[in-house]
Image (spheres, rainbow, N blue to C red):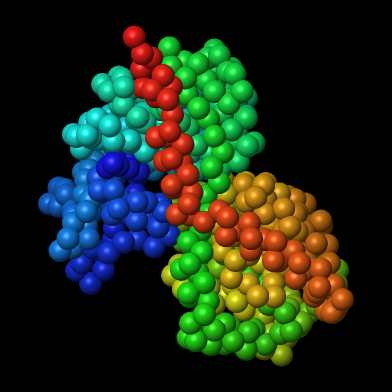
Amino acid sequence: MSLVVVANREPLRQEAGTWVPSVGGLATALLPVLERRGGTWVAWGEKDAEALPLLTHPPGAPRFTVRRLALPAREVAGSYHGMANRTLWPLAHYFLERVEVRRSFYEAYRATNQRFAEAVLEAWRDPAAPVWVHDYHLMLVPALLRATRPRGRIGFFWHIPWPPPEVWQVLPWARQLVEGVLGADLVGLHTPEYVENFLATCRLLTGAAVHGRRVRWQGREIRVEAHPIGIDTARFRQWAAEPRVRERAARIRRTAGSRFVLVGVDRLDYTKGIPERLAAWERLLERYPQWRGQVTLYQIAVPSRTRLASYRQLKRQVDEQVGRINGAFMHDGWLPVRYLYRAFPPRDLTAFYLAADAALITPLRDGMNLVAQEYAWVTENGVLILSSLAGAAAVLPEAVAVNPYDVDGLAEAIHGVLASLADERARQVWDARRAALKKRVAALDVHGWAERFLDSLEAMPAALAGAPPG
């Protein structure tokens, strides 16, 4: 049976004049499914969408179509840069002081969601085919589709945290947004905590009846399930075995020139906790001078949303912190922080994972955090230090859990890990925990995630999917 995927981002990118699959994220999970089933991916065509509204893939033997939407610049500004990035993103991550409430944002968001819904209806030729809508950019789309296709099978997946209902009450349009999501038959989120928050939000904001993990709404029953996403384990295993990747890992350690290497990999986003992490690193070096010259932190910060002033300010803050720490503690060619402000392809990140004795994955809030899974899967001798406020903490309990807001506590946790890595007896404990983490990551594999969600959606009885019988 064919499939219609609806997401803000395209699954293909231009490279040397040809369109090739994007690496990572939804594309990794869903392109194999689309190639197997056939169907359509509906997305915003960020560049040249008017000139090239349709793409077919794979070249030569097309199995699916990418329908690229051309959005007016004003609508992109209000819907994507405004409502999505300056309203919903901070709200979902509990940063209420950063939430911008503007009616113009919501109006643009509603218009964009209407465009997406119309494009989906054009592509949705097989009434039995499921439609899978993704993420906070498109909350209104499920209900818009339901209004036209009352018996259609519609799934929705929310990829970021879903906060408690009290947080949603900040938004004047919270009820409309939640009702939009309830147009789906199956709503997926990463963790049981997010599921419970979603159910509580439905109950409070819409008055819907909630029984277990099902919502009764407008004569229909919507299932809400936890489907934690994973990584492409086969691809990372392949990269980790490549001689050039292993040689690069060795070079990373040689460049550090220290006994231990730590790594942090994040988009430069205020939700990722980079300033707090650097503050803890500085505290560690102040409190435990024995680690000076002995351990190096590689902090990779991927540029993100650079057109927003708040993100530019964050970059200045991080730049200043790195400069201060290095200025205070560097000696004899040793830098305490090696700061890399750029994106790395996953193969190159694999080398950093192999090189690092520990990873500092300490977001202030995160829907899942796939870097944590990538590191846990690739590392051969390392320790994962993980924020308890990341969704990944719910599925990786053998990691060292930390509170990213507690600078002193984080510094102590890093010290404890470094001290244990220097103790051969303690290494045996880490070996067991590392093996357990690898089993968990293997079970979460991204391809299985997609199939599990679609199996659940397609297995729903007719009385649950679409309009009630009668």
Residue located 54% across and 84% down the image: 246
- Comparing 316 with 283, the one in front is 283
Query: Residue 364, image x and y in percent?
Result: 65, 49
Q: Is residue 64 visible?
A: yes
Q: What is the quadrant of the N terminus in the image? A: top left
Query: Residue 189, image x and y in percent?
Result: 53, 38
- Is 297 rendered above or below residue 257? above
- Comparing 462 with 450, the one in front is 462
Query: Residue 327, image x and y in percent?
Result: 69, 76
Residue located 57% across and 87% down the image: 251
- Is 218 rendered above or below residue 138? above
- Comparing 206 with 157, the one in front is 157
Judged left or right of residue 286, residue 297 is left
Q: What is the quadrant of the C terminus in the image? A: top left
Residue 410, picture quadrant: bottom right
Residue located 60% across and 66% down the image: 377
- Residue projecting furthest to the left: 51
Query: Residue 426, image x and y in percent?
Result: 85, 72
